[in-house]
Image (tube, rainbow, N blue to C red):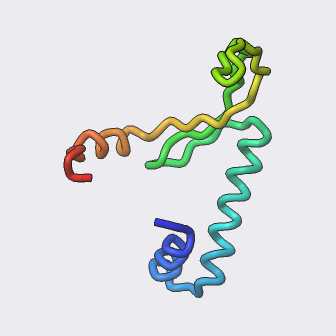
Amino acid sequence: MNTSDLVAKLADHWDMTQSDARELLDTIIHTFNDNIAAGKRFTVPELGTFGTNTRKKRKSFNPHYEQYMMLPPKRVVEFNASKGIKEDLKKVDIDDE
């Protein structure tokens, strides 16, 4: 599924124009991004919890130069899926994909 598919489904489900659905989706995405950038943790029921985590600096090996180097601390996005999504994934057979 891509963005245009999602916009079409939103427009069809909520009986709105695709431009209104696109504006709604953009607002949701910008709200998510603003909260994540601010370091706030938030939960979307039936989807999961979004937040940030800080990775400590660490040593990594660069195979091209055959040297170790220190990677700086880094903020990363975290997502923990809801219980319902995790249970649905257990039901799917890997061979079906």
Q: Horizontally, is 47 left or right of 51 in the view?
A: left
Rendered view: 27 above or below 34? below
Please identify the quarter of the rendering in which residue 87 is found.
top left
The residue sitting at 24% across, 44% down in the picture is 94
**Nearer to the camera, 89 or 24:** 89
Please identify the quarter of the rendering in which residue 54 is found.
top right
The percent coordinates of residue 38 (x first, y second) are: 79, 40
The residue sitting at 71% across, 13% down in the picture is 67
**Nearer to the camera, 59 or 90:** 59
Please identify the quarter of the rendering in which residue 82 is found.
top left
**Nearer to the camera, 74 or 67:** 67
Q: Residue furthest front?
A: 65
Rendered view: 46 above or below 87? below
Q: Horizontally, is 55 left or right of 5 in the view?
A: right
The residue sitting at 72% across, 20% down in the picture is 65
The percent coordinates of residue 71 (x first, y second) are: 75, 20
